[in-house]
Amino acid sequence: MALRSFLFVPGDSERKLAKGDTVGADALILDLEDSVDISRLPVARGMVREYLLAHRGAGPQLWVRINPLDSGLALADLAEIVRGAPAGIMLPKGCGARDVILLGQYLSALEARDDIPAGSIGILPVATETPQAMFALGEFRDAGPRLRALTWGGEDLAAAMGASTNRQENGEYEFTYSMARSLCLLGAHAAGVAAIDTLWANFRDADGLRRDAAHARRAGFTGKIAIHPSQVEHINAAFTPSDEELARARRIVKAFADSQGVGTLQLDGEMLDRPHLKQAQRILAMMAAE
Ligand code: COA
Ligand code: MG
């Protein structure tokens, strides 16, 4: 199964860390950045490292969000937490392939230090958090083999530009942020990696989350960030193909297999051609992916 839900867990919260691996998330993002007060960062680094060491193997994939590469904090974050061999690093406020490659070099050095298989730690950039980053979304194909997925965020981008809000009066994203979402989606698919949708902040609004997640799935995202345990089941459901979808996808694949050499055919009175076959294969692949 592809990774559907990524639950953020503040890296300095004992209670939330304890709860994190019990709520069915496919991955946890142990946070050292915005949800941790700078005064708590040294403590959080140690807690995250211990958590990684104690939870190896079973359970959700464990990712760590470090501080931005230009913050002066990232190297110390990495030096401490790579010892725990996380599945990957979430890179905030990054800028394009260049920053993924730089982070990859740091990881290579630390993997060698800690006897971790070379290249095993993945990278998930939050790819739209600065104005410059918006102009680098088309280049992730050159980011190297550590790149696993792209995600996006609209809050830091708005803050970087002094915008008072990223929403229109009707509650929809302002054009700039809809564009960030689209470019993240396109950039991820252009690079051949998963597109992960941003978070739904109002964690008591389950209906809004379900709508937002369904919208993201229809658009081509395969997963979404969660910030509260109650969001995880809705995200997992939204990004899991239903039995009907799977049955139809199997029928489409079979219909093409039964009509070798035919580019277009009909099923239940509907015209099908290559894009429909590709879409059906993608749905089946969602269930097969690890
Ligand atoms: N991960 C794991 N457990 C969490 C959690 C999270 N992200 N958010 C809440 N919980 C736990 C709480 O600790 C509580 O369990 P407990 O009673 O055993 O302590 C339970 O879930 C219910 O939490 P609730 O009381 O509804 O919320 P809260 O007031 O404790 O926390 C937030 C609300 C928003 C502060 C919290 O969900 C959170 O910290 N989210 C992540 C924030 C983050 O990482 N942001 C960075 C990315 S933008
Ligand atoms: Mg942020």
Image: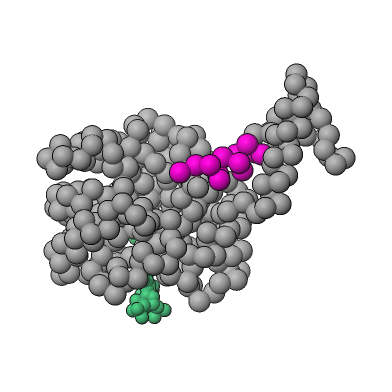
In percent of the image, x 31 and y 51: which residue is there?
57
- For the C terminus, give its image quadrant: top left
Q: Is residue 76 left or right of residue 104?
A: left
Prevailing SS of the magenta stretch: helix
In percent of the image, x 56 and y 54: which residue is there?
239
Above/below status of 288 relative to 223? above
Q: Position of residue 36 (x, y in %)?
A: 25, 67
Residue lying farthest to the right in this orientation? 269
In percent of the image, x 49 and y 42: which residue is there?
289
Q: Quadrant of residue 120?
A: top left
Q: Is residue 246 left or right of residue 153?
A: right
Above/below status of 112 relative to 202? above
Q: Is residue 200 magenta?
A: no
Q: 245 or 225, which is in the foreground?
A: 245
Q: What segment carries the magenta color?
A: 279-290
Q: Is residue 245 left or right of residue 172?
A: right
Q: Position of residue 195 (x, y in %)?
A: 48, 46
Q: 105 or 168, which is in the foreground?
A: 105
Q: Is residue 283 magenta?
A: yes
Colour theme: one colour
Q: Is residue 216 visible?
A: no
Q: 193 or 251, which is in the foreground?
A: 251
Q: Is residue 115 visible?
A: yes
Q: 234 or 166, which is in the foreground?
A: 234
